[in-house]
Image (cartoon, rainbow, N blue to C red):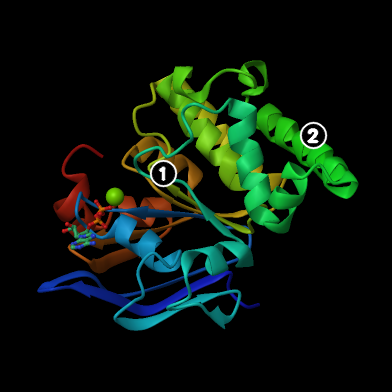
Amino acid sequence: MTPVLKLDEATIQFGGLIAVNKVSFELKQGELFGLIGPNGAGKTTCFNLITGVYAPTGGIVQFQGETVNGLPPFKIANKGIARTFQNIRIFPSLSVLENVMVGAFLRNRSSLGAALAHMPGAIKETARQRAEALALLELMDLADVAHTRSADLPYGKQRRLEIARALATEPSLLLLDEPAAGMNPQESDDLMQTVRKIRDDFGKTVLLIEHDMKFVMNLCERIVVLDRGEMIAQGGPSEVRNNPRVIEAYLGEAV
Ligand SMILES: Nc1ncnc2c1ncn2[C@@H]1O[C@H](COP(=O)(O)OP(=O)(O)O)[C@@H](O)[C@H]1O
Ligand SMILES: [Mg+2]
């Protein structure tokens, strides 16, 4: 079966720094996949290569069998990849529901202008998107704050909102950059259940970056470890956790 995502020796050099160096891995349909490593290892840069923020200076990035290197971010997004950011990016003055509806409009760009012009088809479409957005808020446990100004949400809920908005674009691949950052243990446990549900009930493939090892080890089926741009290990959670090179570079004696 064609992998959902394939990196084949993906590389990017910024001046003298090789931030991602010949990194290769594949995600199967429906996998929960982790990307871990110390700060500066190149994890977010991998996301930027996958989503078209940067074009790789070497190697290949394929999505569902198609090479996407060098395509602009909106084209890659339209193919079915959505992401969240290490530093939350939501529209702070919009309500929670409105933020999710922006995601739905991004999926169908033509609908935004039509909706603004109050065209009949568009009104129906907007109603449908509103209903779908509300269902996503339900899934993300945000239904009770649908009409709250997003800036007024506590941090953990802002992170969940960003995921809801990403899902509203109906991606087949969801990339989460440190989704549990800043969450307390209860919030991070809840998020783990939700991400599992996103895969189990909605069939999404998920690639996530996370420093919370409990989160990664309990949730991810396979994990890639980066250190200074290089892939130093790949495998299941226990394999990675017991890998001496990973312990030395990242996990230390804590795990
Ligand atoms: N646009 C850029 N220009 C120059 N250097 C960059 C750029 N983006 C990332 N880097 C560098 O690439 C390395 C990897 O960064 P990053 O991918 O953000 O690490 P991680 O997410 O694993 O903490 C860092 O040394 C960072 O400073
Ligand atoms: Mg990062």
Secondary element under disc 2, as helix, strand or loop, is helix
- Between the residue at mark 1 and the residue at mark 2, the CA separation in whole angstroms equals 32 Å
Classify 19 as above or below 169.
below
What residue is at 83 percent from the left and 47 percent from the top? 122
Classify 97 as above or below 13.
above
Q: Which disc is residue 131 wearing?
A: 2
What residue is at 50 percent from the left and 77 percent from the top? 68
Of the pair 111 and 254, the residue shown nearer to us: 111
Left or right for 9, reference 83: left
Q: Nearer the viewer, mark 1 or mark 2?
A: 2
Residue 180 occupies which quadrant of the picture?
A: top left
Instruction: Name the residue tied to disc 1.
Output: 216
The amino acid sitting under disc 2 is Ala
Q: Position of residue 44 (x, y in %)?
A: 32, 55
Classify 215 as above or below 143.
below
Q: Which disc is residue 151 wearing?
A: none
